[in-house]
Image: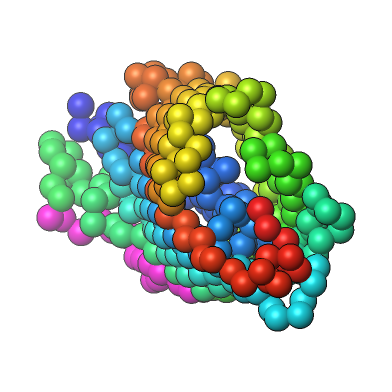
Amino acid sequence: MNSVKSILRVFVFLIPVSLGAQDLDIHWSQYYNAPFYINPALTGVFSGDQRFTGNYRNQWYNVPVRYETFALAYDQKFYIKNMKSGLFGGGVHMFHDQAGASRLRMFQVALSGSYTQRLAPKYYLTFGAQGSFNNRRYSTDDLSFDYQYNGNEYDPSSPNGETFLNTNFNFASMGIGLNLHNQHSARTWFDFGGGWFNLNTPKQKFNDQVAYRMKPRFTGYLIGGLQTTDLIDVMFRGMAMFQGPNYESLAGLGLKFHLNDTKTRELALHIGVDYRFNENDAWAPVVGLDFRQWKVSFSYDLNTSDFREATNLNGGPELCIQYIITTVKPLPMIKSCPVY
């Protein structure tokens, strides 16, 4: 039994390490509610003037070690006087990710900027750029090693026989992106674009002998809504992400029910489901509520891949909360600046 426990502990430790050797970036099931993650060109692209976003994800809820991610973000539009067909956007975000028994952690703080140019009355093209500071670290406190078995039992107080020269390092990363926004009407719209991250291939290094270069990540997506009746919109979305030999693809559909369209008392309920195609990985049903400036969305992964033997079908919960501020603008600014 001790040998089995040892193997399991090492396996759980190696999951983030082996994946980290190829793909060090996090992922969300509600990627459409994490714009800072899929494209810096989505900075400032929303209906309103200032946006606060919080995201939380607990991956593989039934696995005994923690795989958690949380993020906070703020972005806004900057209106420039006499600028008739464009505007700037800016924002800041941070996230913290922890994986496995080694508590392999990633902490990032990033600044994003964007410029939006009106191409036609209903089409806007945005270029965005992002720079980030990152810290990656792990802990050996909860790990066990063969050296700590004395032949009869496991002794956690015994030396582990290993030398860890460096358990954390810092690095910087850069990204750019393009986004095409169409606002056919107040409730019919779409965003189509792509973001390129880790363009400087930052060095990943836990020791002085071996250094790994993080591979660039490309994310392409299509997200939008289509008004079908006075009450109902159809929401559609899809995303594909590529990083070295790794990829991830998701797609989903939903319905949004506008229960109250009265100004300052807007209320809408949305339901939907997404599917992660990687090795038939998971379904992610989602439910959300929009009330005035608040948007709350909750999803839960139902794991359907071979890993379901360990998760009992349970992937994990994910929560997004947004608060959007819209200010009253002078009439000349409303006429000259794109509004969506």
Q: Quadrant of residue 146?
A: top left
Q: Is residue 173 visible?
A: no
In the displayed structure image, the side of residue 263 where residue 10 appears, left or right: left
The rendered magenta stretch, by its main secondary structure, is classed as loop
> Any magenta on residue 14?
no
* In the image, farthest residue toward the bottom: 81
Q: Quadrant of residue 251?
A: top right
In the displayed structure image, the side of residue 339 where residue 17 appears, left or right: left
Q: Which residue sits at x=58%, y=21%? A: 280
Q: Is residue 96 visible?
A: yes
In the displayed structure image, the side of residue 272 where residue 178 appears, left or right: right
* Quadrant of the image containing the N terminus: top left
Residue 258 x %, y %? 50, 31
Residue 266 x %, y %? 45, 41
What coloring was used for the rendering?
A: rainbow
Report the number of numbered marks: 0
Q: In this picture, which residue range is highlighted in magenta?
A: 157-170
Q: Nearer the viewer, residue 177 or 1?
A: 177
Q: Which residue sits at x=86%, y=58%? A: 119
Position of residue 248 relative to residue 46, above or below, is above
Q: Quadrant of residue 276?
A: top right
Q: Nearer the viewer, residue 253 or 251?
A: 253
Q: Which residue sits at x=51%, y=65%? A: 327
In the displayed structure image, the side of residue 188 where residue 117 appears, left or right: right
Q: Which residue sits at x=29%, y=41%? A: 65
Position of residue 132 relative to residue 296, above or below, is below
Residue 268 x %, y %? 46, 34
Residue 78 x %, y %? 62, 73
